[in-house]
Image (cartoon, coloured by chain):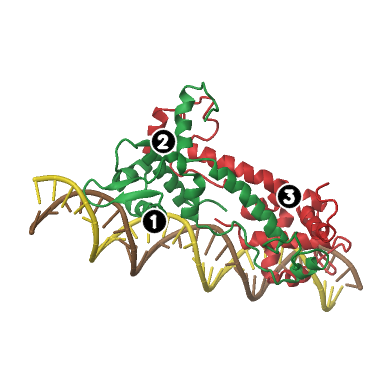
Chain colours: A red, B green, C yellow, D brown
DNA sequence: TCATTATGGATCTTCAATGTCCACAATATA
DNA sequence: TATATTGTGGACATTGAAGATCCATAATGA
């Protein structure tokens, strides 16, 4: 279980766009050179980011990419969900198994008590809780917060005041 | 990014072992029937769990598997790490890129200030934080806690008192 | 019109996840 | 001791997603 390289590329690409906000358009050439990835592959990733409204793209001469909203409004979760997809981190593969029937006997699981909720599998319920934890953290961290990290470190005065 | 089916199988298998602690050995046949998975494949998974000391295995007639320690001392994290491996959730693939050099200019990153720490990539630092969050949650949930969920739900008196 | 730049389709390779089969070792029991 | 049972580990097959490349096409500015 690992994040894909594409997620790596996407995050670093957005970092570069956020870092160069003065200039309006950054071409795929500059991005691919900066990250050390092929233009072909990186352009697929940028297209995904565009389809999901993370970046804007302009074709033609002097075209390129730019962030479609301020860097502090692009969270890690946003980016990860675009690239990795939005399926659950964990899905129970056998809800009809003997296991589920036997646990249902001495608990809730099947009947709609208050306990069961949406997912009947108890393992899945725990894993969904884990996923929520993860998402919360990833939502609190943005492209801007990484840019801030790079700056803030040189002069460490105001440690935590955003 | 998803947990593998093997992790699903492993967790449910351990649940079954924990649930049937009265009997000492549960064979692969019973496990595979309960979970609805082939014996061949499930036995690979059980072997892994044995190699990592999660279960004990006895070959021969009346042999089978049992938990090697109490169910409340087998955490979700334990199981997941055995099956999924222990690599980081995220690894930055290009520490020598232009990106890293350019961010280094106006920050820390390369020089060993207090900020940099072990990993030089700022994206990786954020992701490592996310991983820690996840791990903490997964460490707080055990095989026993899922068994408890099944029981506790039928009579909901003491909601949170473990 | 032309050079530039992004887009999307097609295709290829690689590799891990999933799954099966089989020979072998260990064990209990008759 | 012989035999049936049960876990182990190696070999192998299949599948699908990730990673990557190439090219025709569309859009844009000069």
Please tell me how crowded label 3 is: few (under 14), some (14-19), or many (20+) other residues with Cα within 10 Å: some
Q: In whole angstroms, how far apart are the C-alphas of marks 2 and 3? A: 38 Å
**Residue at left offset 56%, top offset 47%:** A89
What is the x, y in percent for residue A145? 78, 53
Q: Which mark is residue A1?
A: none
* Eye-nearest disc, 1 or 2: 1
What is the x, y in percent for residue C25? 24, 62
Q: Nearer the viewer, residue C21 or A103?
A: A103
| Label 3: element kind | loop
Q: Nearer the viewer, residue B89 or A24?
A: B89
Q: Which mark is residue B51?
A: 1
Earlier along the polypeptide chain: callout 2 or callout 3?
A: 2
Residue to which mark 2 is pinned = A100
| Label 2: element kind | helix
Please tell me how crowded label 2 is: few (under 14), some (14-19), or many (20+) other residues with Cα within 10 Å: some
Q: Is residue B98 left or right of residue A94?
A: right
What is the x, y in percent for residue B17? 37, 41
Quadrant location of the N terminus of chain A in the rendered image? bottom right
What is the x, y in percent for residue A30? 78, 70
- Residue A92 visible: yes
Q: Chain of mark 1?
A: B
Q: Chain of mark 2?
A: A
Q: Is residue B92 left or right of residue A74?
A: left
Q: Is residue B34 left or right of residue A38?
A: left
- Residue A86 visible: no
As displayed, is residue A83 above or below residue B21?
below
As displayed, is residue A127 above or below residue C18?
above
Q: In whole angstroms, how far apart are the C-alphas of marks 3 and 1? A: 38 Å
**Residue at left offset 74%, top offset 68%:** B110
* Eye-nearest disc, 3 or 1: 1
Residue to which mark 3 is pinned = A141
Q: In whole angstroms, how far apart are the C-alphas of marks 1 and 2? A: 27 Å
């Amino acid at each position: 279980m690992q994040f894909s390289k594409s997620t790596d590329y996407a995050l670093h690409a957005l970092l570069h766009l956020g870092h160069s906000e003065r200039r309006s358009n950054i071409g795929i050439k500059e991005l691919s050179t900066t990250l050390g990835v092929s233009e072909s592959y990186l352009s697929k990733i940028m297209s995904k980011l565009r389809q999901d409204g993370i970046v804007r793209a302009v074709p033609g001469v002097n075209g390129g990419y730019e962030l479609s909203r301020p860097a502090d409004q692009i969270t890690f979760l946003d980016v990860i969900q675009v690239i990795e997809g939005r399926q659950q981190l964990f899905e129970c593969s056998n809800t009809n198994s003997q296991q589920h029937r036997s646990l249902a006997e001495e608990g809730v699981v099947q009947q709609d008590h208050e306990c069961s909720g949406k997912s009947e599998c108890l393992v899945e319920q725990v894993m969904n809780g884990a996923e929520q934890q993860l998402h919360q953290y990833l939502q609190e961290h943005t492209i801007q917060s990484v840019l801030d990290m790079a700056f803030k470190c040189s002069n460490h005065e105001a440690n935590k005041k955003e």
